[in-house]
Each structure stands twice: as C-alpha cells, then as structure tokens.
C-alpha cells in the first residue's frame, strides 16, 4: 500500500476545483500551508505547514499535526505544551494548495510566546507609509501561559 | 528613500516576538503568506501571498493587494471582479512571517470559482485512511457569482 492511495493525482482544473476527490498540492519543499482558527470564536490562531505525513496524521488522529520547518520534523501540536488542537472541521481550498483547520484548543492558547493567538499584534492601515518602522499595537494584553514554565530550555522556533 | 524605511531589520528574537517594530520576514521567493478572514463572520475567505510591494500597497490603500504566484504580478483583489477587500484590521504573527487581514468584501464573495470562501469543501477526520481518494463534501451549495460572466476568458489561476 503506497501512502498516496488516500488522495488522487491532479489531472484537470475542473477535477481539482469542482470535484469531490481530495487532490492536494504540496509545494517544491513538499509542504502545504495550514490556517488554524478557533472553531468557536473564529479567531485566527496560527499559520503553519504540513507535509504529506502530517496531513495524513492529522486526518487519522483528528488532532493537528504540523511539519516544523525550523526543526524539519513532524510536530504533534501540544505534545510538549499539552495545548493539543482537536480538529472540529478540516477544509481545503479551491485549487487544493491550502488547508483550513477549525480547532478546539485544550488550555486556550496556541502561541509558543504564550498568547492565545500567534497574531497578537496589529498594524495601522491607510495613508502614506512613515519613514520609520511602523509601530505595532498589542491586541492581547496578557499571556495565557509562561513559555519558560511550559517549554523550559527548548530552542525557540523563531528564526531571524 | 529606500522602500524598507517603513519596516525594521530583524535583529533579535525578542525584538521580533515581543517588540513593537514591524519587521516582516519574506521567504526565499520574497513572499509572506496572508490569511484573509471576513471581519464580521470570522470565516476564512482565502490564503494568498504578498511581496514587499503588495504589503506596502495594502497598508497604503487599506485594500488587499496580493502577489499572484501564477501570474507573477501584483494583484489588487477586485480590480477585475469588483470584489474589493477593504481591510478592517491587519495583524502579523509572533515571528512576523505571516499576515492576517480581516476584511469587508464588496459583493460578499472572495473565490474565483464563484463561492463566498475559497474553502468551500471539507474532509472527514478521525480513524484510518481509506484506500481510495478521500471524498470531499461541499459546504457551500450555491455560487455567489458566475465566474464566466465576471472573468470571461481570463486564464484560470489554478495550476496543476
């Protein structure tokens, strides 16, 4: 049994856009981007990636499994932190090159920095751009957990 | 005046994650992924990309401007279809390598296939995978517009 029996080859635009066969497109690095929202609030929690194995494991377990680009390894979200993301609904987009997970998060936080959402800062829009770096505004005022307590000395995934 | 005056160089993890300076990371192709949700319903509308110019134009205009990978060109969403996305809020994530747009969509549709959301199909999750391609379920039953009327003979952006 090959791994790809559970999805179809991409044959035509009509099949991919209007059909009912799963036919995902992985990019040149073998990855597909994933958008994860809170199923109750609709809030965007994180943006990540899956490889073929991560997508298969997410479907099989019903819990979010990503591919960590910084660690180049499968990443069962919550394995370290306990903040598992239970998948309430999984959707795929028109050209089947992006995945949407609607999840229920144990513990209520999804960001390694400690916030509920990874998208905890906003930018002003409209008008000409300043000649100094645009100032961000924090939209979450308090961390849900202390990353030092949860992750200890594990390497920070953020790369410069 | 160089284009980069409006954002900072990435110096430290702390600056990027905990700071108030915009310091986006564009990938090896000069792109940053963008998640676009409906500001009222919270529904995920699309997943796209911006290059530096698209991000600058989005901030300046207050309307979503993407970079089309299939056309390799700046793409002011709605220029052809009229379905402009007005940016209600723009956020950036912890490591500043992904953007979240909360938008108000003229005409109520964001997908070139004619649906409200690009993510109009779902997959079942949980349990072992089948040996045939997984069957998708349509979550939107009717198109909001007819792509043939709106786009005419313009090339379809979906690539196999």
Image (cartoon, coloured by chain):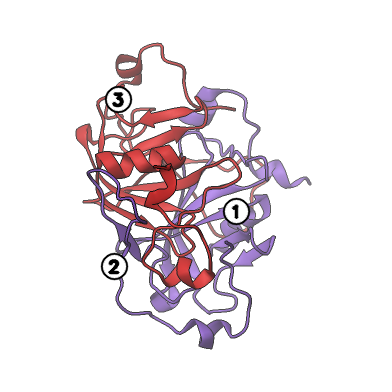
Chain colours: A red, B purple
Instruction: Report the Cα–Cα distance between label 2 and label 1.
Output: 28 Å
Report the residue marked by disc 2.
B139
Q: Is A151 located above or below residue B160 in the figure? A: above
Instruction: Report the Cα–Cα distance between label 3 and label 2.
Output: 31 Å
Image quadrant occupied by the C terminus of chain A:
top right
Report the residue marked by disc 1.
B50
Report the residue marked by disc 3.
A79
Residue at image x 62%, y 83%? B153
Residue at image x 49%, y 57%? A9
Q: What chain is tagged by disc 1?
A: B
Q: Residue furthest front?
A: A1
Give the image location of residue A99, x and y in percent: 41, 52
Q: Which mark is residue B42?
A: none
Q: Quadrant of residue B128?
A: top left
Secondary structure beneath dot 3 equals loop
Secondary structure beneath dot 2 equals loop
Dots 1, 3 in contact, CB < 8 A: no
Which of the two residues, A4 or A141, is positioned nearer the viewer here? A4
Give the image location of residue B55, x and y in percent: 60, 53
Which of the two residues, B23 or A32, is positioned nearer the viewer here? A32
Q: Is residue B38 left or right of residue A15?
A: left
């Amino acid at each position: 049994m090959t791994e790809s029996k559970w999805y179809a080859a991409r044959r035509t635009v009509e099949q991919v856009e209007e059909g009912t066969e799963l036919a995902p497109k992985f990019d040149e690095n073998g990855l597909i981007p994933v958008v994860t929202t809170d199923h109750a609030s609709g809030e965007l929690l994180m943006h990540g990636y899956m490889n073929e194995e991560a997508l298969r494991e997410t479907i099989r377990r019903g819990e979010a499994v990503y591919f960590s680009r910084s660690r180049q390894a499968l990443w069962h979200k919550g394995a370290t932190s306990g903040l598992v993301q239970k998948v309430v609904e999984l959707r795929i987009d028109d050209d089947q090159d992006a995945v949407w997970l609607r999840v229920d998060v144990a513990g209520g936080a999804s960001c390694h920095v400690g916030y509920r959402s990874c998208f905890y800062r906003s930018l002003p829009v409209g008008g000409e751009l300043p000649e100094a770096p645009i100032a961000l505004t924090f939209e979450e005022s308090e961390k849900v957990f202390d990353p030092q307590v949860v992750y200890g000395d594990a390497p920070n995934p953020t790369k410069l």
